[in-house]
Amino acid sequence: MSVRGGQLPLALAVPAHARFETFVAGGNAAALRHVREIAAGRNEIVWLWGGRGKTHLLQAACWAADRAGRRAMYLALARDGSVVPEMLRGLEAIEVLALDCVDAVAGDPLWEAQLFTLLNAFGSGQAALLMAARSAPAAAGFRLRDLESRAAGAVIYRLEPLGDDDQVMALVAHAQARGLALDRAAAEYLQQRVARDMAELVGWLDRLDRESLAAQRRVTIPFIRDLLAAAG
Protein backbone atom coordinates (compact mmCIF):
# COMPACT_ATOMS: atom_id res chain seq x y z
CA MET A 1 0.00 0.00 0.00
CA SER A 2 1.46 3.34 -0.92
CA VAL A 3 0.58 7.00 -0.71
CA ARG A 4 1.52 9.67 -3.22
CA GLY A 5 1.88 13.37 -2.61
CA GLY A 6 -0.53 14.81 -0.06
CA GLN A 7 -3.34 12.41 -0.80
CA LEU A 8 -5.06 10.72 2.09
CA PRO A 9 -5.01 6.96 1.41
CA LEU A 10 -8.04 4.72 1.12
CA ALA A 11 -10.16 7.68 0.03
CA LEU A 12 -10.24 8.83 3.64
CA ALA A 13 -13.45 10.70 4.38
CA VAL A 14 -12.67 12.93 7.33
CA PRO A 15 -15.79 14.85 8.41
CA ALA A 16 -15.51 18.57 7.77
CA HIS A 17 -16.16 19.32 11.44
CA ALA A 18 -13.32 17.05 12.66
CA ARG A 19 -10.71 19.80 12.89
CA PHE A 20 -8.52 21.11 15.68
CA GLU A 21 -10.51 24.35 15.54
CA THR A 22 -13.69 22.58 16.65
CA PHE A 23 -12.01 20.57 19.43
CA VAL A 24 -12.76 22.22 22.75
CA ALA A 25 -9.94 21.02 24.98
CA GLY A 26 -11.37 21.47 28.47
CA GLY A 27 -9.01 19.43 30.65
CA ASN A 28 -7.29 17.94 27.60
CA ALA A 29 -5.11 20.89 26.59
CA ALA A 30 -1.87 18.92 26.88
CA ALA A 31 -3.17 16.12 24.66
CA LEU A 32 -4.43 18.61 22.07
CA ARG A 33 -1.12 20.46 22.03
CA HIS A 34 0.85 17.24 21.60
CA VAL A 35 -1.35 15.93 18.79
CA ARG A 36 -1.08 19.31 17.01
CA GLU A 37 2.70 18.97 17.21
CA ILE A 38 2.44 15.47 15.75
CA ALA A 39 0.45 16.79 12.79
CA ALA A 40 3.01 19.55 12.27
CA GLY A 41 6.04 17.25 12.18
CA ARG A 42 6.81 15.72 15.56
CA ASN A 43 7.44 11.97 15.33
CA GLU A 44 6.32 9.93 18.32
CA ILE A 45 3.92 7.18 19.32
CA VAL A 46 0.93 8.57 21.25
CA TRP A 47 -1.86 6.58 22.90
CA LEU A 48 -5.17 8.30 23.71
CA TRP A 49 -7.75 6.64 25.91
CA GLY A 50 -10.94 7.25 27.88
CA GLY A 51 -13.34 10.13 27.53
CA ARG A 52 -14.79 11.41 24.30
CA GLY A 53 -13.03 13.12 21.41
CA LYS A 54 -10.42 10.50 20.55
CA THR A 55 -11.73 10.00 17.01
CA HIS A 56 -12.05 13.77 16.58
CA LEU A 57 -8.40 14.29 17.52
CA LEU A 58 -7.13 11.48 15.29
CA GLN A 59 -9.06 12.72 12.27
CA ALA A 60 -8.10 16.34 12.92
CA ALA A 61 -4.45 15.30 13.07
CA CYS A 62 -4.70 13.54 9.72
CA TRP A 63 -6.40 16.54 8.13
CA ALA A 64 -3.83 19.00 9.49
CA ALA A 65 -0.92 16.73 8.59
CA ASP A 66 -2.21 16.40 5.04
CA ARG A 67 -2.52 20.17 4.77
CA ALA A 68 1.06 20.46 6.01
CA GLY A 69 2.26 18.14 3.26
CA ARG A 70 2.66 15.03 5.41
CA ARG A 71 1.31 11.67 4.25
CA ALA A 72 -1.51 10.79 6.63
CA MET A 73 -3.99 7.99 7.16
CA TYR A 74 -6.86 7.32 9.57
CA LEU A 75 -8.06 3.75 10.12
CA ALA A 76 -10.60 2.44 12.63
CA LEU A 77 -9.91 -1.17 13.61
CA ALA A 78 -12.70 -3.75 13.94
CA ARG A 79 -13.34 -7.47 13.91
CA ASP A 80 -16.38 -7.30 11.63
CA GLY A 81 -14.41 -7.95 8.47
CA SER A 82 -14.46 -4.33 7.29
CA VAL A 83 -10.72 -4.21 7.96
CA VAL A 84 -8.23 -7.08 8.16
CA PRO A 85 -4.81 -7.40 9.84
CA GLU A 86 -3.01 -7.46 6.48
CA MET A 87 -4.06 -3.85 5.95
CA LEU A 88 -1.44 -2.80 8.49
CA ARG A 89 1.43 -4.11 6.39
CA GLY A 90 3.65 -1.41 4.98
CA LEU A 91 1.93 1.42 6.85
CA GLU A 92 5.21 2.47 8.42
CA ALA A 93 5.64 4.46 5.20
CA ILE A 94 2.83 6.76 6.35
CA GLU A 95 4.18 9.88 8.07
CA VAL A 96 1.16 10.29 10.37
CA LEU A 97 -0.78 7.08 10.96
CA ALA A 98 -3.87 7.22 13.19
CA LEU A 99 -5.31 3.92 14.41
CA ASP A 100 -8.66 4.16 16.19
CA CYS A 101 -10.46 1.52 18.32
CA VAL A 102 -7.25 -0.44 18.84
CA ASP A 103 -8.74 -2.37 21.75
CA ALA A 104 -11.45 -3.72 19.41
CA VAL A 105 -8.92 -6.20 18.02
CA ALA A 106 -7.06 -6.97 21.26
CA GLY A 107 -6.84 -10.69 21.90
CA ASP A 108 -6.77 -11.62 18.22
CA PRO A 109 -3.37 -13.22 17.45
CA LEU A 110 -3.21 -12.03 13.83
CA TRP A 111 -4.10 -8.45 14.70
CA GLU A 112 -1.72 -8.40 17.65
CA ALA A 113 1.18 -9.70 15.56
CA GLN A 114 0.63 -6.97 12.96
CA LEU A 115 0.27 -4.28 15.62
CA PHE A 116 3.51 -5.40 17.29
CA THR A 117 5.37 -5.24 13.98
CA LEU A 118 3.94 -1.78 13.31
CA LEU A 119 4.84 -0.45 16.75
CA ASN A 120 8.39 -1.69 16.32
CA ALA A 121 8.63 0.07 12.96
CA PHE A 122 7.34 3.38 14.31
CA GLY A 123 9.67 3.11 17.27
CA SER A 124 12.50 4.27 15.00
CA GLY A 125 11.16 7.82 15.24
CA GLN A 126 10.93 8.31 11.48
CA ALA A 127 7.15 8.79 11.52
CA ALA A 128 4.28 9.39 13.94
CA LEU A 129 1.74 6.87 15.19
CA LEU A 130 -1.45 7.92 16.99
CA MET A 131 -3.47 5.19 18.68
CA ALA A 132 -6.81 5.41 20.48
CA ALA A 133 -8.67 2.97 22.70
CA ARG A 134 -11.19 2.93 25.53
CA SER A 135 -8.49 2.05 28.05
CA ALA A 136 -4.78 2.34 28.71
CA PRO A 137 -2.49 -0.28 27.11
CA ALA A 138 -2.29 -2.37 30.29
CA ALA A 139 -6.08 -2.76 30.33
CA ALA A 140 -6.67 -3.04 26.58
CA GLY A 141 -6.85 -6.83 26.65
CA PHE A 142 -3.68 -7.68 24.74
CA ARG A 143 -2.55 -11.29 25.05
CA LEU A 144 0.86 -10.65 23.52
CA ARG A 145 2.82 -9.26 26.45
CA ASP A 146 5.50 -7.78 24.22
CA LEU A 147 2.78 -5.79 22.43
CA GLU A 148 1.35 -4.56 25.71
CA SER A 149 4.82 -3.53 26.87
CA ARG A 150 5.61 -1.77 23.59
CA ALA A 151 2.27 0.09 23.63
CA ALA A 152 2.82 1.11 27.25
CA GLY A 153 5.99 2.86 26.12
CA ALA A 154 3.98 5.37 24.11
CA VAL A 155 3.18 8.85 25.34
CA ILE A 156 -0.17 8.21 27.02
CA TYR A 157 -3.01 10.67 27.57
CA ARG A 158 -6.31 10.00 29.27
CA LEU A 159 -8.98 12.24 27.76
CA GLU A 160 -11.26 13.79 30.36
CA PRO A 161 -14.96 14.41 29.65
CA LEU A 162 -16.00 18.00 28.99
CA GLY A 163 -17.80 20.04 31.60
CA ASP A 164 -21.14 21.69 30.84
CA ASP A 165 -19.70 25.03 29.70
CA ASP A 166 -17.15 23.34 27.48
CA GLN A 167 -19.86 21.15 25.94
CA VAL A 168 -21.85 24.23 25.00
CA MET A 169 -18.75 25.83 23.48
CA ALA A 170 -18.09 22.64 21.51
CA LEU A 171 -21.68 22.55 20.22
CA VAL A 172 -21.45 26.14 18.99
CA ALA A 173 -18.08 25.41 17.34
CA HIS A 174 -19.42 22.29 15.60
CA ALA A 175 -22.45 24.24 14.39
CA GLN A 176 -20.25 26.98 12.96
CA ALA A 177 -18.14 24.36 11.15
CA ARG A 178 -21.35 23.16 9.48
CA GLY A 179 -22.41 26.68 8.54
CA LEU A 180 -25.26 26.40 11.06
CA ALA A 181 -26.22 29.40 13.17
CA LEU A 182 -26.62 28.22 16.76
CA ASP A 183 -26.46 30.76 19.56
CA ARG A 184 -25.36 29.89 23.09
CA ALA A 185 -28.89 29.95 24.50
CA ALA A 186 -30.09 27.41 21.93
CA ALA A 187 -27.03 25.24 22.55
CA GLU A 188 -27.67 25.29 26.29
CA TYR A 189 -31.34 24.40 25.73
CA LEU A 190 -30.35 21.36 23.66
CA GLN A 191 -27.68 20.27 26.13
CA GLN A 192 -30.10 20.40 29.06
CA ARG A 193 -32.67 18.19 27.34
CA VAL A 194 -30.62 15.32 25.92
CA ALA A 195 -27.88 13.15 27.40
CA ARG A 196 -24.84 15.25 28.21
CA ASP A 197 -22.62 13.21 25.96
CA MET A 198 -20.78 14.87 23.06
CA ALA A 199 -21.45 12.02 20.63
CA GLU A 200 -25.20 12.25 21.23
CA LEU A 201 -25.19 16.05 21.22
CA VAL A 202 -23.35 16.18 17.91
CA GLY A 203 -25.79 13.60 16.54
CA TRP A 204 -28.65 15.91 17.46
CA LEU A 205 -26.78 18.79 15.87
CA ASP A 206 -26.59 16.85 12.60
CA ARG A 207 -30.34 16.22 12.81
CA LEU A 208 -31.06 19.88 13.52
CA ASP A 209 -28.96 20.83 10.52
CA ARG A 210 -30.94 18.52 8.22
CA GLU A 211 -34.35 19.42 9.61
CA SER A 212 -33.76 23.17 9.60
CA LEU A 213 -32.64 22.98 5.98
CA ALA A 214 -35.70 20.95 5.01
CA ALA A 215 -38.07 23.27 6.88
CA GLN A 216 -36.20 26.43 5.89
CA ARG A 217 -36.18 27.52 9.54
CA ARG A 218 -33.48 28.89 11.79
CA VAL A 219 -32.29 26.72 14.69
CA THR A 220 -33.97 28.51 17.58
CA ILE A 221 -35.17 27.26 20.95
CA PRO A 222 -38.78 26.84 19.64
CA PHE A 223 -37.45 24.84 16.68
CA ILE A 224 -35.39 22.59 18.96
CA ARG A 225 -38.37 22.17 21.29
CA ASP A 226 -40.61 21.12 18.38
CA LEU A 227 -38.08 18.63 17.09
CA LEU A 228 -37.53 17.10 20.54
CA ALA A 229 -41.28 16.80 21.03
CA ALA A 230 -41.69 15.09 17.66
CA ALA A 231 -38.93 12.64 18.62
CA GLY A 232 -40.70 11.81 21.86
Image (cartoon, rainbow, N blue to C red):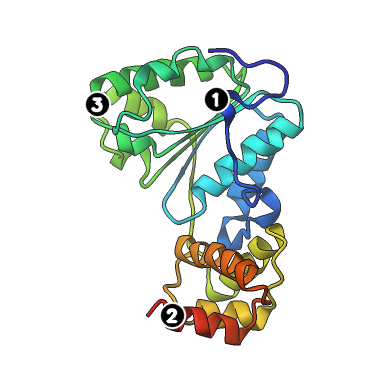
**Identity, as a three-letter code, of the amino acid under mark 1:** Leu
Q: Look at 72% across and 24% down and name the residue there.
A: 6
Q: Quadrant of residue 230?
A: bottom left
How many marks the image carries: the answer is: 3
Tell me the residue that label 3 is attached to: 108
x and y percent of residue 203 in the render?
49, 62
Between 157 and 210, the one lying in front of the other is 210
Q: Residue at x 58, y 14 (%)?
A: 93
Q: Residue 168 location, x and y as percent?
A: 60, 73
Residue 220 to residue 1: above or below: below
Q: Earlier in the sequence, mark 1 or mark 3?
A: 1
Label 1, label 3: how far apart the Cα atoms are: 24 Å
Residue type at mark 3: give it.
Asp
**Residue that label 1 marks:** 10
Which label was assigned to residue 230?
2
Badge 2 marks a residue whose secondary structure is helix
Farthest bottom residue? 222
Q: Is residue 113 left or right of residue 12?
A: left
Instruction: Point out the residue furthest to the right here.
Output: 68
Give the class, few, some or many, for how many residues have Cα within 10 Å of label 2's Cα (few <14, many ≥20).
Answer: few
Up the image or down, 154 lies above or below 221; here it is: above
Q: Residue at x 34, y 24 (%)?
A: 147
Q: Amino acid at mark 2?
A: Ala
Decide: is 133 above or below 149.
below
Q: What separation in Å lies between label 2 and label 3 (alpha carbons)?
A: 44 Å
Residue 200 is left or right of residue 187, and the answer is: left
